[in-house]
């Protein structure tokens, strides 16, 4: 069965409307670039049962089936319940925490709670920050990475937004050695001058790494080094707008406990209304917290104030 959509504007926003049912396509079903192209060329968008999107002239037979194609796994990801998605992430984190797997790579949009879930999961397992796991955030060089792995060679190391290591060939080679599946993982850094720690003490050129690494990044998994991907569990926490709103509803009661639930519910309603009306609305947990704090103050112009905080400037 196929569904046929046409590009129309609703309250000034370009959307895909089912020509048979009149329903508006959900976020993630049709990409914005496909929608804009169809509008510019006067075409219809045909979505097959497998989720494949194709274009056809409006004069063509819209009931004709699209060319059969293999199902894209992305179509499955776009329909996952966020509760299941984060439940799986929690299980993968526990496997690293128990030493079953040496590494986990978590990617996805910012502001969805990736770091909070990882650290909470490890803590709930009885592991303590600093003694059992360490958390580093920001830029990292190959030399800095080597020193960090040496100083925490028996711990779980969380590398949060340290995307620079994926762009440095030397850093990637260090990570390959650290994440190998061998019983003994030896890491080397050979240079004309020995590396030194912050106290001026020399760092050995070789050492054995028995720890584990959890990467948290906002970059696309396709940009990761294949060798690192193959050595790690991977979890892509990318959510479309529908899934993000669902996630807010699931977490609402436990987020910002000092804010009354009615204020948080109002914040969510405002965010949904703004997203339906405007382009560029930042739909994530950080935006929701901003909106909830504004609504908790009881401002008469809460919608306008929220809009100023969560709609990006063009």
Image (tube, grey):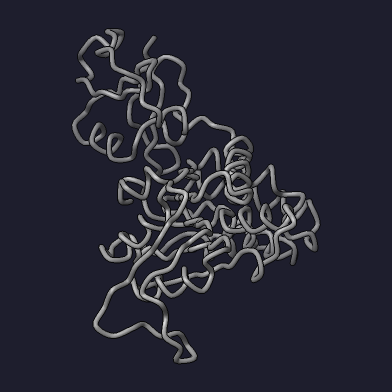
Instruction: Indicate left or right for 135 with 189 as reference.
Output: right
Rendered residue at 40%/61% (across/down): 186
Image location (x, y in percent) of residue 50: 37, 18
Q: Residue furthest bottom?
A: 200
**176 to 298, vertically: above or below:** above
Q: Nearer the viewer, residue 24 or 70?
A: 70
Q: Nearer the viewer, residue 289 or 294?
A: 289
Image location (x, y in percent) of residue 214: 51, 56
**180 to 82, vertically: above or below:** below
Question: What is the number of callouts on the image?
Answer: 0
User: Which quarter of the rendered picture does the C terminus lie within?
Assistant: bottom left
Instruction: Indicate left or right for 248 with 124 as reference.
Output: left
User: Which quarter of the rendered picture does the N terminus lie within?
Assistant: top left
Image location (x, y in percent) of residue 77: 47, 33
In terms of image quadrants, where is residue 55?
Answer: top left
Image location (x, y in percent) of residue 56: 21, 20
In terms of image quadrants, where is residue 207?
Answer: bottom left
Rendered residue at 45%/36% (across/down): 27
Q: Nearer the viewer, residue 304 or 285?
A: 285
**13 to 198, vertically: above or below:** above
Instruction: Indicate left or right for 108 with 294 as reference.
Output: left
Rendered residue at 51%/70% (across/down): 136
Rendered residue at 38%/54% (across/down): 219
In terms of image quadrants, where is residue 303?
Answer: bottom right
Q: Nearer the viewer, residue 227 or 82?
A: 227
């Amino acid at each position: 069965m196929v569904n046929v959509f046409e590009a129309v504007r609703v309250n000034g926003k370009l959307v895909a409307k089912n020509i048979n049912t009149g329903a508006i396509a959900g976020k993630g079903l049709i990409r914005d670039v496909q929608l804009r192209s169809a509008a510019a060329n006067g075409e219809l968008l045909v979505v097959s049962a497998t989720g494949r999107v194709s274009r056809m002239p409006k004069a063509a037979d819209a009931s004709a089936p699209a060319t059969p194609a293999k199902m894209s796994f992305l179509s499955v990801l776009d329909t996952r319940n966020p509760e299941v998605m984060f439940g799986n992430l929690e299980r993968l984190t526990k496997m690293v925490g128990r030493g079953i797997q040496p590494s986990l790579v978590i990617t996805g949009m910012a502001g969805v709670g990736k770091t909070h879930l990882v650290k909470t999961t490890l803590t709930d397992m009885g592991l303590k920050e600093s003694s059992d796991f360490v958390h580093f955030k920001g830029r990292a060089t190959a030399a800095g990475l080597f020193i960090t792995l040496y100083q925490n060679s028996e711990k779980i190391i969380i590398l949060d937004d340290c995307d620079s290591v994926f762009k440095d060939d030397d850093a990637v080679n260090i990570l390959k050695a650290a994440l190998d599946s061998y019983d003994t993982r030896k890491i080397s850094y050979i240079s004309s001058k020995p590396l030194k720690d912050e106290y001026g003490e020399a760092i050995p050129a070789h050492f054995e790494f028995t720890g584990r690494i959890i990467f948290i990044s906002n970059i696309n998994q396709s940009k990761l080094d294949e060798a690192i991907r193959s050595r790690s569990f991977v979890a892509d926490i990318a959510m479309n707008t529908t899934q993000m709103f669902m996630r807010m509803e699931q977490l609402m009661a436990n987020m910002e406990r000092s804010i009354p639930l009615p204020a948080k519910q109002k914040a969510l309603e405002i965010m949904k209304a703004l997203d339906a009306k405007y382009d560029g609305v930042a739909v994530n947990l950080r935006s929701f917290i901003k909106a909830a704090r504004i609504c908790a103050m009881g401002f008469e112009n809460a919608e306008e104030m929220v809009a100023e905080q969560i709609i990006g400037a063009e």
